[in-house]
Image (spheres, rainbow, N blue to C red):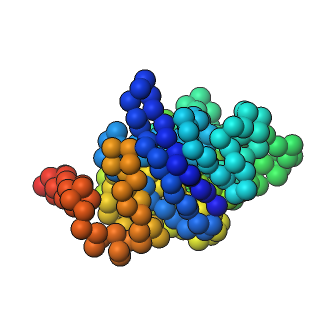
Amino acid sequence: MIKLENVCKSFDGVPALKDVSLEIEDGETMAIIGGSGSGKSTLLRLIIGLIKPDSGRIWIDDDEITHMDEKELDRVRLKMGMVFQYSALFDSMTVGDNVSFGLREHTDLSEDKIQEIVAEKLELVGLPGMQKMMPGELSGGMKKRVSLARAIAFAPKIILYDEPSSGLDPIMTGKIDDLIIHAQKELNVTSVVVTHDMASACHISDRIAMIYEGELIAVDTVKNFKQIDDPRIRAFMKSVELHEKGERE
């Protein structure tokens, strides 16, 4: 479904990703973990075509997107839905208009059909009947749910999540994790979840990939990943555990 081959990316001469090769299988959930500035969000932006690599190639299905222009990329992006870190909702639009925005911009569907899809997707994310509410009236967790409803309105094959639990308390984080699992099962999508939350990564994913200082240092199943004896991975997992313990106290 997604394949990166020897991908490199730098910003102002500073490497963000170094020779990354990764394959994400059709229908699986892949968690991309790493510390702040490790390059994991850069990876997500490359997959959706917001930025281009300096070298290497990227496939989405059978489309090699590296040298595509914006028009060609827009066609490929219709296969993907993105859930942004801070939801990225339009504050001046209702929940219903936020969810339907892409449908109105990129399809010729009738208004009745659009409203049907909006209602269906809000139901799927546990927000039935919320069409007329404004983003300012929603909690952080509810905004994440609306963002997911918007991402899946096109019935995408791929959903990309950028730090979906960022800014949420542990209870709401668990609910968002369950929602990601539910969406994957209900829609049979391929999911890529960028997160620094190791507990979430283990709960939601089939495999975990870790990026450290721009390098992909490990990719494995959750069970096997926990057993990897690499000091960089052990240090990351320990730091996450200490941070979570501090938050609880």
Residue farthest to the top?
12
| Residue 126 in the image, given as x and y percentages of width and height | 55, 60
Q: Quadrant of the C terminus?
A: bottom left
Q: How many numbered marks does the figure carry?
A: 0
Q: Residue at coordinates 61% horizontally, 46% vertically from top-left?
A: 57
Judged left or right of residue 7, residue 140 is left
- Residue 231, image quadrant: bottom left
Residue farthest to the bottom?
223
Judged left or right of residue 33, residue 43 is right
94 up-or-down from 210: above or below: above
Please tell me which residue lies in front, 49 or 195: 49
Whether residue 241 is visible here, answered yes or no, is: no
Judged left or right of residue 45, residue 243 is left
Q: Residue at coordinates 41% horizontally, 26% vertically from top-left?
A: 13
Q: Residue at coordinates 49% horizontally, 41% vertically from top-left?
A: 8
227 up-or-down from 120: above or below: below
